[in-house]
Amino acid sequence: MTLGEKLSKLRKEYNYTQEQLAGILGVSRQSISKWESDIAYPETDKLIKMGKLFECSMDYLLNEDITEKQGLQPTETESIWDMFKKQLHERKSEKMIFGMPLYHIGRNAHGFFAIGFKARGVFSFGLMSRGVFSVGLLSLGVISIGLLSLGFISAGVFSAGLLAVGTIALGLFAAGAISVGLISFGALSVGCFSTGALAIGKYAAVGDHADAMVAIGKTVADGSVYRHIGDLTTADIPTVVEWLDANVPSWLCWAKEIFKFFIQLK
């Protein structure tokens, strides 16, 4: 098998077009075509680069008697991270949507569907990810999921957004083990309106231990204008609603109505 035949085979196995491979190597598409047709031969530095790109030895590329690909052996100092990075082969669609490739897979990916260490696109997946729908270790998007997540709708170990769900959640609506929000649900919950095992609210709180202007607690209730220990009865609800209407400012009327609906369900 000639060098050109091997290059053509490897390129197709790794899903590269001649244009894409040319861009990676910094040569023209015609050069790739000539190499694969055995009309011309790549320079030594290009051979070394292709050996790393295709994870094969120089012996395999240059020796026509060797027909089976020989993988590169990892060095003693090569980390698991380095070995993992080698598996992320550059791939890019020629089809464009909104000025972006339909898909792009690479270390720095930008496409409608983007997958990479750094990824940005409509749908993005990566260690550092930005997109309308974003998933990553560090994630930023309209809908965002990640270890550290920021978005309109956000979910993660640490999340912040209009609607945030996470171990530690910060948002207009927040739910998590520790949550901080205008309306907050969590084991430790802090907000204007909060509910949880330990609920601390500016205006209202419901929980095992509740602290707010209107406090409704299972065991402890510390309320500056109204407090109630135990479950609310039907007779208690009008009193709570009256206190909420009297103390919550008008710009928070929508949140107040949500909280009133919540206590009427309990």
Image (cartoon, rainbow, N blue to C red):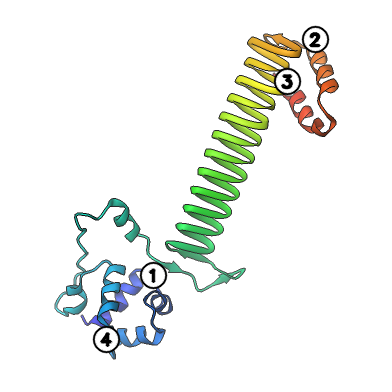
Label 2: which secondary element: loop
Q: Is residue 85 left or right of residue 173?
A: left
Q: Earlier in the sequence, mark 2 or mark 3?
A: 2
Q: Residues within 10 Å of mark 3 (few under 14, many from 20)?
A: some
Quarter assignment of residue 34: bottom left
Image point (30%, 78%), residue name:
46
Percent position of residue 107, x then y = 42, 61
Q: Earlier in the sequence, mark 1 or mark 3?
A: 1
- Residue at the far left in the pictured view: 65
Mark 2 lies on residue = 235
Query: Looking at numbered disc 1 in the image, what kind of residue is underneath it?
Result: Asn
Query: Looking at numbered disc 3 in the image, what kind of residue is underneath it?
Result: Ile
Image point (43%, 63%), residue name:
106
Mark 1 lies on residue = 15
Q: Is residue 248 left or right of residue 170?
A: right
Vertical position of residue 135 compared to residue 23: above or below: above
Query: Of tags 4 and 1, which is closer to the observer?
Result: 4
Percent position of residue 42, x then y = 28, 83
Q: Is residue 53 left or right of residue 196?
A: left
Q: Earlier in the sequence, mark 4 or mark 1?
A: 1
Image point (75%, 14%), residue name:
224
Mark 4 lies on residue = 41
Query: Looking at numbered disc 2 in the image, what kind of residue is underneath it?
Result: Ala
Q: Gap between marks 2 and 1, in whole Å?
A: 70 Å
Q: Gap between marks 2 and 3, in whole Å?
A: 13 Å
Vertical position of residue 144 compared to residue 234: above or below: below
| The disc label shown at residue 263, or none | 3
